[in-house]
Image (spheres, grey):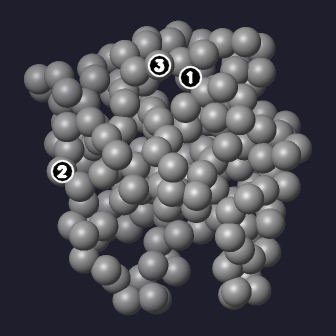
Amino acid sequence: MPAFSPDPRRRAAEEKCLADIEAFGLHVLRIRGDDEYPEYAYSVGLPTLGQPEVLVLGLPADVAQALINRVADLVDEGRRFADGDTVHDIADGFPVVFRAVPAAQAAAHCKWIAWYHEGAPVEVLQLVYPDRAGRWPWEAGIDDAFAWQQPVLATAPVPAWAADPAPPARKARRRSVTPRFTNI
């Protein structure tokens, strides 16, 4: 079992995370964005269902969480997803592609995965979605704003904020814990 924080608020969030994993097979964390980096969400606990963790960048947190929950629902039905898979039944009307997240990116973006798995290496997949014209972030002609909104972590540099420790107030603003929706 992961070590709990001595901070009462943090410990309550950690206990909620473990309770959600026990009840639903995962917990979803929603991270607020700012003018330096887009918002994102990621799962904690999906490996308990035999699936790598999943991260979604650049969508409103509730939408990203719904996509992660849809992945969990499909995993509950016996589906499994891996690097390079294109899937047509996760996002309504759009295919998505799963891309492996390098360990350095996972460490920068998904601190709670490291906490839950007690620092053990864990596979993380980025769920990548196309723009409204059906173009992927790595294709020519993609809008710069869309590319900024959804960096593909397999090829993007680790963000500067991950290498440069921020003051506690900034970290608190960046990190926001939200439980899994159960009715999506």
Q: What residue does disc 1 label?
A: 91
Residue at 65 percent across and 36 percent down: it is: 46
Decide if residue 107 is on the left or right side of residue 79.
Answer: left
Q: Is residue 6 visible to the viewer in this orientation of the structure? A: yes
Q: Which amino acid does the dot numbered 2 rest on?
A: Pro
Q: Is residue 41 visible?
A: no
Horizontal and vertical percent position of residue 94: 48, 17
Say which residue label 2 marks: 157
Mark 3 or 1, nearer chain start: 3
Placement of the C terminus among the 4 image quadrants: top right
Residue name at image x 66 percent, y 12 percent: 79
Report the number of numbered marks. Answer: 3
Q: Amino acid at mark 1?
A: Ala
Front: mark 1 or 2: 2
User: Is residue 178 shown left or right of residue 40?
Assistant: right
- Above or below: residue 111 compared with residue 5: above
Q: Which residue is mark 3?
A: 82
**Callout 3 environment at 10 Å: few (<14), some (14 to 19), or many (20+)?**
some
What residue is at 46 percent from the left and 38 percent from the top? 124
Whether label 3 touches label 1, CB < 8 Å: no
